[in-house]
Image (cartoon, grey):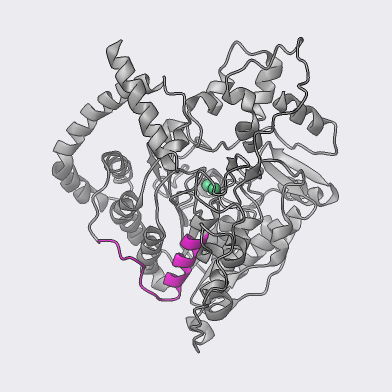
Amino acid sequence: MVLETLDSSREGSKRKHANGGDAAVPCSDDDELSNGDLNTASGLSSKRARASKEMTFEDIYGAEALLNGEDEEDDSDWEPVQTPVEFVKWCCVNCTMANPGDMVHCYICGEHKESGILRHGYFASPFFKDSGLIEVEEKCGGSSATSSTAVGFDERMLLHSEFEVKAQPHPERPDRLRAIAASLATAGVFPGRCLPIHAREITKQELQMVHTSEHIDAVDITSQLLYSYFTSDTYANEYSARAARLAAGLCADLATEIFSGRVKNGFALVRPPGHHAGIKHAMGFCLHNNAAVAALVAQAAGAKKVLIVDWDVHHGNGTQEIFEQSKSVLYISLHRHEGGNFYPGTGAADEVGSNGAEGYCVNVPWSCGGVGDKDYIYAFQHVVLPIASAFSPDFVIVSAGFDAARGDPLGCCDVTPAGYSRMTQMLGDLCGGKMLVILEGGYNLRSISSSATAVIKVLLGESPENDLPIATTPSRAGLQTVLDVMNIQMKFWPSLATAYSKLLSEWETRLIENNKNQVKKENQVKRKKLVRVPKWWKYGRKKHLYKFFSARTKSRSKRC
Ligand SMILES: [Zn+2]
Ligand SMILES: [Zn+2]
């Protein structure tokens, strides 16, 4: 019912739907709610199947009928109830999850119903309505511009938002920039220790280095409409085209300033994000590919070799498409993949570039969720840094999504601010620290603001907070992924070969154990299909209930 209503209301309104593409789904539901299951439900009528394809975040969390497994198709005997039952009372400002009205703290992330996160960023207490005044760390230094860290930000990017006010907010929302900006201000980092750069809209000519004229026009025309959708989750309002041009313009100018040496490094605090935007399409909340624009602008300014490291939890399919035949831009992405079942489905280890540029695309595809600092740092030590050093870039761009951060409702991984700051530090040693970090995804405000602040502090020259040990032990799944990638990439980067043989012999026993456990796990997963509680309870405040139900199902299946 909910789906049908939403769909028909959209069709009858002033709306442009450029293409019906993928819907990025949060990982917070169990398998029954995944795209795959919905799309393969052969028993559904074509009407319902169409509605399922169009599912948005609101649909997934708001459609109680689906959660309860009710059949919403046959409504011939439906009678309106006297008093409508209202289930969702408030949505958490921090993680967007829906909460029953009588709860004061979000049952997923613990944030207070009247969170102060937009005023004080992650310094606001998650447990109290208002944490009061926060001491500002005043450390304004007298450093010269050439040793400065620049930050690109413009409030007009906050005007890009979904036109329709829904019960479940779209995760890519203006509050993301507000929370990061509030954290930086409270920490005295920006304004304070970083250099602001003037914002300008990028020109069509500059955008044409990356995108087709048709794509640029398709984005521009949205400024004449109240709202538009490129895919069911990639929205635009009348201000989006300008926000996208400002985001790309800030990235372009930061790239020029850093490459020319006028500033040391920089952070682009921008939205809409860019790494899913391809040569001729917008998708996955992305309109223009900001990182690709920055890379080509840096090359126009004289950079011969540009490295793009993409640590957003999703594969940057747009960036890969733009550079897959280029030997002058090396693209390295670390992302959840799960055999192509995680959005957007691309980015397998054997996607290595094409047409003479094989080896200039490096994908580190995690096989499961929950990946944390240890696996990321291990992959940096054994794949990212050895290949990056052999490539020897003049300029480094980081597509920095913070949706692999602990607490993210879409990524469900476990990277901490310390992990992000360590990765930033490791990349800072390349090409004399000429590095531009560009915000991509990340949807838990507390996680993205603490992570972004930690990254900028490293750009400013501080040591990573809560220093992690240099030698890290990866998880079994992480180790397997890293070895698979090394095995594929050593054909193009021979320096990996020795390290690969050494690691293989070192971890042989563990890998045999891994295979045995894999079989065991698969059997357990089959049994766990009986569990009717959402998988995301495992990561939130309901983890005890999750364990309880999982254990109960397990023991019940043993008795059978
Ligand atoms: Zn929450
Ligand atoms: Zn992402």
- Residue 128 in view in this figure: yes
Residue for point 24% across, 29% down: 517
Residue 138 placed where, x, y %? 51, 82
In the depicted structure, whether residue 453 falls above or below residue 498:
below
**Horizontally, is 400 left or right of 512 in the view?**
right
Residue nearest the observer in this picture, 287 or 466: 466
**Horizontally, is 421 left or right of 514 in the view?**
right
First to last magenta residue range: 449-469
**Horizontally, is 93 left or right of 10 in the view?**
left
Mark count: 0
Residue 114 placed where, x, y %? 62, 55
**Horizontally, is 480 left or right of 225 in the view?**
left
Is residue 112 located in the magenta-colored stretch of the structure? no
Residue 297 placed where, x, y %? 59, 64
- Residue 150 in view in this figure: no
Is residue 466 located in the magenta-colored stretch of the structure? yes
Residue 75 placed where, x, y %? 74, 13
Q: In which image quadrant can residue 546 be found?
A: top left
Residue for point 85% across, 50% down: 224
Quarter containing the C terminus = top left
Quarter containing the N terminus = top right
Residue for point 28% across, 16% down: 558
Q: In which image quadrant can residue 68 be found?
A: top right
